[in-house]
Amino acid sequence: MLNLPAIRPVRGFAWQRGFEDHVADLDLVVDLGARIGSREWWRGLASCTALCAAALAFWPSFPTLSAEAPAPLTEAQWQEARALAIAPLALGADTGRRMAPTTAVRPLLDTPERPAIDLTATLGRGDGFARVLERSGVGSGEAAAVAAMVGQIVPLGGIPSGTRMDMTLGRRVNRAQARPIDALAFRARFDLTLRVVRVNGQLRLIRTPIAVDETPLRIQGRVGAGLYLAARAAGATPKTVEAYLRALGSRIMVGRDVRADDRFDMIVEHRRAATGETETGKLLYAGLDQGRRRMQLLEWTLDGRRQWYEASGLGERRGVMQAPVIGRLSSGFGLRRHPVLGFSRFHRGMDFAAAYGSPIVAAADGIVSYAGWHGGHGNFVQLRHGGGLGTGYGHMSRIVARPGAHVVQGQVIGYVGSTGLSTGPHLHYEVYRNTVAVNPATIRFMTTSQLTGAELVKFRAMLNKLTSIRTVPKFNAVAGQSGVPAS
Ligand SMILES: [Zn+2]
């Protein structure tokens, strides 16, 4: 706080000077934070309190404001106000003048019925065809009859959910009965419209096929900044692009090997109905033109396995044998002292120490040639793979594989245990070449399927047929723009 400046006017009388000196020394604005408890501090506190009290004493008081309450409406006024007002529908829209019926009004004995009702129902997911009809007011007997008629043409479960059914319900004999179906129309399939009409009291089913063009759709473009976005911009659906990337991924590393100047080329199943709808199916062909190198992949089924083949007829390389269990190699292949028998014996496989109950998976695709108890092997499973190769899995706690079943690489065939001649939970793993046990460490199962002969001719013919498809100009126009068409 500031001290008041000492004002010293011209000096007059002695008492006056004394008073002036006193006033000059008087510190009126005491710092209440300093020298607490001193005389000056108490004086400062007292003057501060006095000032606060004075300020509160002069606090003004405000009178309460009053307003006139509106006079209540008389009945006549209320009626008039209601006649002129527009009340919200949510509040009943209770407006207008109330009028009592005059003598000219004659009450009806019965309200008239509409002769026919046109309505639209939608088949929901998990809904039943007859149930939709019943829900719309059709009698259960007639709904079942119509469902049976339609069921002869298309499987009722095959009608896609969301299908709109336009129907006309006709006049009924009395109110206790359900209205009969006069007409019903819906799209039963992508290429078929069904109509049910009543002719001379009998229901008749009319099929109207819709012409569908099934020419596959070819989508091409330059990779540019990104393959995914470029393909989407060119008109490919997300599912198509995913399938395309997966197909490419079976041959190259897409993130590393695809350049901006490369051109992608995909052909997808596509159906165009005469009524304008389109439907996109699965990817049939995946191509990538890298200038120096051109990749053409076509999906083909050989021996029940569908995979991507190159134009030369070369299939996907199926990797090396998968490790049958996640565990530590505890004993290798070869001569060793047997832990239970105590003498040297040739170890015909590899041992993997793993926790009891760990899943054991098939090292490669194959057929279960044995599953059951097998002496010292305990619970034992043997698989036969192609090319004279086989694998065996011993000491299982539980067998899952069934003899004769087909298993794929990575499929669980049993669980780690310690059955048979075993000192603790581990997997005894054998690999055979032409029924002779070999060192699993030396085997690399590189299997590549190759189309040959008549199969290759068929494959080439399909490839030529597909790649002769011309790109739809519309999609060329769209390519390069940022907009992604919804499909
Ligand atoms: Zn072993």
Image (spheres, grey):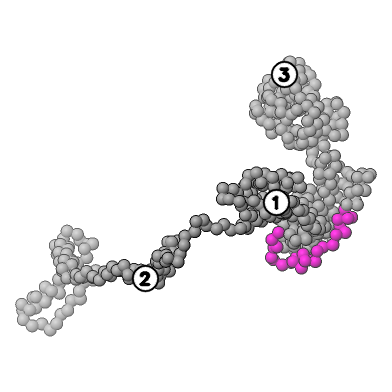
Say if mark 2 contacts mark 1, CB within 8 Å: no
Sequence-wise first label, 2 or 1: 2
Q: Residues within 10 Å of mark 1 (few under 14, many from 20)?
A: few
287 on left or right of 95? right
Q: Residue at x 77, y 56 (%)?
A: 208
Instruction: State the image quarter where residue 276 is shown.
Output: bottom right
The residue indicated by pointer 2 is 81
The residue indicated by pointer 1 is 201
State the mark number for residue 54. Answer: none
Tell which tag, 2 or 1, sits nearer the viewer.
1
Q: Is residue 256 among what the camera can see?
A: no
Task: Pick the quarter of the image with the N terminus.
Answer: bottom left
Sequence-wise first label, 1 or 3: 1
Task: Pick the quarter of the image with the C terminus.
Answer: bottom right
Is the residue marked 2 within 8 Å of ligand 1, measured from its CB? Answer: no
What kind of residue is marked 1? Gly
**Which of the two residues, 408 or 421, is positioned nearer the viewer here?**
408
Tell which tag, 1 or 3, sits nearer the viewer.
1
SS class of the residue under badge 1?
loop
Q: Residue at x 83, y 28 (%)?
A: 432
**Residue 103 percent across, percent down from the top left:** 42, 65
Separation of residues labelled 3 and 2 (CA atoms): 101 Å
Sequence-wise first label, 3 or 2: 2
**Which of the two residues, 122 or 8, is positioned nearer the viewer here?**
122
The residue indicated by pointer 3 is 421
State which region is magenta: 463-487
